[in-house]
Image (tube, coloured by chain):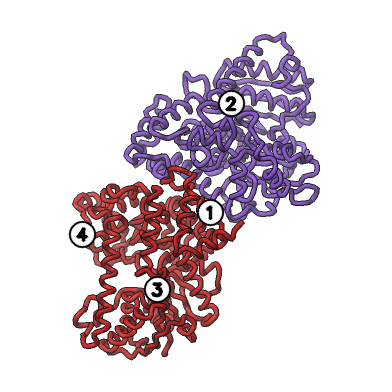
Chain colours: A purple, B red
Amino acid sequence: MSIKISFIGAGSVRYTVKLVGDLAKTKELNDSLVSLMDIDEERLEAVYNLCKRYNEEIGGNLKFEKTLDREKSLREADFVINTALYRAPGHEDGYVSYEIMRDVAEKYGYYRGIDSQEFNMVSDYYTFTNYNHLKMSLDIARSVEKICPNAWLIQTANPVFEITQLIKRLTNVKVIGFCHGVEGIFEVLKALGIDKKDTDWQIAGVNHGIWLNRFLYKGENAYPLLDEWIEKESKNWESTNPWDTHLCPAVIDMYQFYGLLPIGDTTRNGSWKYHHSLEAKKRWYGKFGGIDNEVERPKFYEELRQIKRMIMEVSKNPKIKITENWPEEFPKEKLSGEQQIPFINALTNNIEVRLFLNVLNNGTIQEIPDDIVVEVPVKVNKNGIFPEKIEPDLPEKIKKYYLTPRIMRMEMALDAFITGDRKILEEVLVRDPRTKNYDDIPKLWDEIFNLPFNKEMKEHYNKYK
Amino acid sequence: MSIKISFIGAGSVRYTVKLVGDLAKTKELNDSLVSLMDIDEERLEAVYNLCKRYNEEIGGNLKFEKTLDREKSLREADFVINTALYRAPGHEDGYVSYEIMRDVAEKYGYYRGIDSQEFNMVSDYYTFTNYNHLKMSLDIARSVEKICPNAWLIQTANPVFEITQLIKRLTNVKVIGFCHGVEGIFEVLKALGIDKKDTDWQIAGVNHGIWLNRFLYKGENAYPLLDEWIEKESKNWESTNPWDTHLCPAVIDMYQFYGLLPIGDTTRNGSWKYHHSLEAKKRWYGKFGGIDNEVERPKFYEELRQIKRMIMEVSKNPKIKITENWPEEFPKEKLSGEQQIPFINALTNNIEVRLFLNVLNNGTIQEIPDDIVVEVPVKVNKNGIFPEKIEPDLPEKIKKYYLTPRIMRMEMALDAFITGDRKILEEVLVRDPRTKNYDDIPKLWDEIFNLPFNKEMKEHYNKYK
């Protein structure tokens, strides 16, 4: 069945190329119509060019269209993949404004910025200062609601938790949040020397706060293998790169307190104990201090920008065989491991698959409210999305001490955004352990509002009262 | 109907005398058998003497017994009033160990002690360091379960929230938590110049975290009258004593953020913004800085001790007519306003009454779990306790931003106490904004455990692991 897939924010070059590659390699889908949409014409041209060449080199039959017009792209779309990150006029990418807002906050003593919070230390997962991006993401969802109300909206850009929840709350769009954090489990299996074929595992929680609730190896509880590794091997552990934190001391510490292993980005989302300084980060995340710090994060953004510039260059040189010259970026056969295309294939062609998606809880995790977006294992086929029974249940400690306060912060971010009540934004900092002077809180927010790219945010938060 | 009421911790002299006075003045109950129990023989003698004289002077027909044996007192009891506060051997009262533990914590930078926490700043509402008192309270409940399982346990000693919840969780005792904080509403009515006869109000939440959800004056919303008072009068407000905080700037600030007026002790239980220093307390609670600070709190304890000593003296001089010489402490006709005796009278003699009690939620406050102890208006009569429908519902902000984190801290205190897992106690401080050095946390707890009166606590928290 030929379908139409709209990529909103297609100028997120690497992501788009990767997913288009997956599409071209998926035989049931490789005659789909791919509609690439971005507001950046130059980037759109580049990605259009590369996607076409990639499809050709792989031998796919995808059809492509490109447009600067969101609504045009959405027309008759069956699936909408949203990877768009808000970018202020004149900025190279969305990270520029993130870094500017972080700098303002650090001047007031908020190390790593306002949005770095207990249980959310990921440096580009902005929830409180991120008005522009939340607004744009909501606008995209509203366009979907208007133009292609039956389409699935595949929310891929972060903050997945807050955006998916926001769209669920304010629209009727069939939105699902996507993240690949769950793959962190494979790093753990590798370290323990366990073949994944022999394992049975479940992971559940909220986005970037997920836990290995079931872990069996050849039918037996495999946690003792982890305990053994901790006893014997953990002292020799060292991170090989800033992302390699799957079994770092912070993870072991979280495991020993909460009773389950945190998986994927969850390892980065502990309390300030692990994050209050670069030194603390190095002690708990290995020699790089993880990726969420003042040394590694700027390097990473620079890396992303270099790859993007390189890709732009390649797009202008049609003679280069991209799969041959950049096999890592454009592999010929290997799928990316991202969940988006298997999700589409399962719904469209009934190729059933197990995925980890962000969907409304509706009783999946007991005691968490039904209307909260959770990240849980699901079976997807032509009949829909079916969450697995979470078994064993998450421990009370994780629900009460970790998920509940994380959910509260999501609620505060959404309430502030929806109501325009700046007192909620201020209250977030009233409760922030980094606050030295409560009288500075309104000043800090004023400074954030007065940044040139936050004009609309300022108006929004001044409407109230 | 003649009933037996057991007073456990009867040596809490003032409380016992006050409630016995209410009993003697309540005609349907004034032939009851009052069983006074305490482990302090001298205090027990004094209170026994005073209660008998008070009863006589009033003209009541109460019968009295006294005993050092808890189980003996509980035999055939219909109601058990627990006012006992744990007192370490050699200490004048329970506050001595509280102050010692506070001093230890302050040495590590925890102003007002470990137990002062966001949404619980009441200086003698100890939840985390209070092993001895929680243990004793639970033991009393277990005796009730064994000796008089059909009796109602009237939990009067603080922390009412944590103790009531603990007893509900670990026993089958019919326990109800009692507090008089709700009376704070009358101070508000007085300030607004409103006659209570013309009002209709409801207050709901958790103990020391209660909110005026319904407030009608002559059938109309009375909140505009409060708003008017705030606009015109609040600038002239000054506290007349350390307890006079019902309309202080902190309360107005909380009202303006949460949307409802906090009542009673709730006014003392905001965030660190109001409490981080004596200066802050004075700014937000008036010139005394409230009662929860280093100046007023020791004065208050000294006052209590002086009254107690005075009462002990009086007990030794049988010639003094107490109601004539101390009409404030021993009023002849006026009831104390405490809820315990009207509660007993309603259940026993069907004298229906509206009270504010701490009972299992079971849907009374929507979205709060059923098994959480909430403080809500109830109708009591011979058929039982019937919570009113909370109408209008508490705002989402109060449930999500205030009650939920307060409930989380209760859960952490109970989990630590029940499991003996000291990592939970440490985690409380990991999340505490006052923490300067995370490595000090275990040291601080060791120092608390090593206090001579915490021997049992130390053993309890060393069992684990």
Q: Which circle's residue, 4 or 3, is located before the other in the chain?
A: 3
User: Alpha carbon of mark 1 to alpha carbon of mark 4: how far?
Assistant: 40 Å
User: Alpha carbon of mark 4 to alpha carbon of mark 3: how far?
Assistant: 29 Å
Where does label 1 land, which residue? B424
**What amino acid is found at the position of numbered circle 3 in the picture?**
Thr
Measuring 53% from the left and 24% from the top, which residue is drawn there?
A298
Does residue A407 appear left or right of residue A106 in this picture? right
Between circles 4 and 2, the one closer to the viewer is 4
The chain containing the residue under callout 2 comes to A
Instruction: Evaluate whether label 3 is on the same chain as label 2.
Output: no
Q: Are marks 4 and 2 in contact (CB under 8 Å)?
A: no
**On the image, which quarter does residue B84 sit in?**
bottom left
The chain containing the residue under callout 1 comes to B
Q: Secondary structure at mark 4?
A: loop
Judge whether B231 appears above or below B213 on screen.
Answer: above
Q: Secondary structure at mark 1?
A: helix
Where does label 2 land, which residue? A9
**What amino acid is found at the position of numbered circle 1 in the picture?**
Ile
The chain containing the residue under callout 4 comes to B
Does residue A93 appear left or right of residue A450 in this picture? right
Measuring 67% from the left and 33% from the top, which residue is drawn there?
A78
How packed is label 2: few (under 14 Cα within 10 Å), some, or many (20 or more)? many
Instruction: Evaluate whether label 2 is on the same chain as label 1.
Output: no
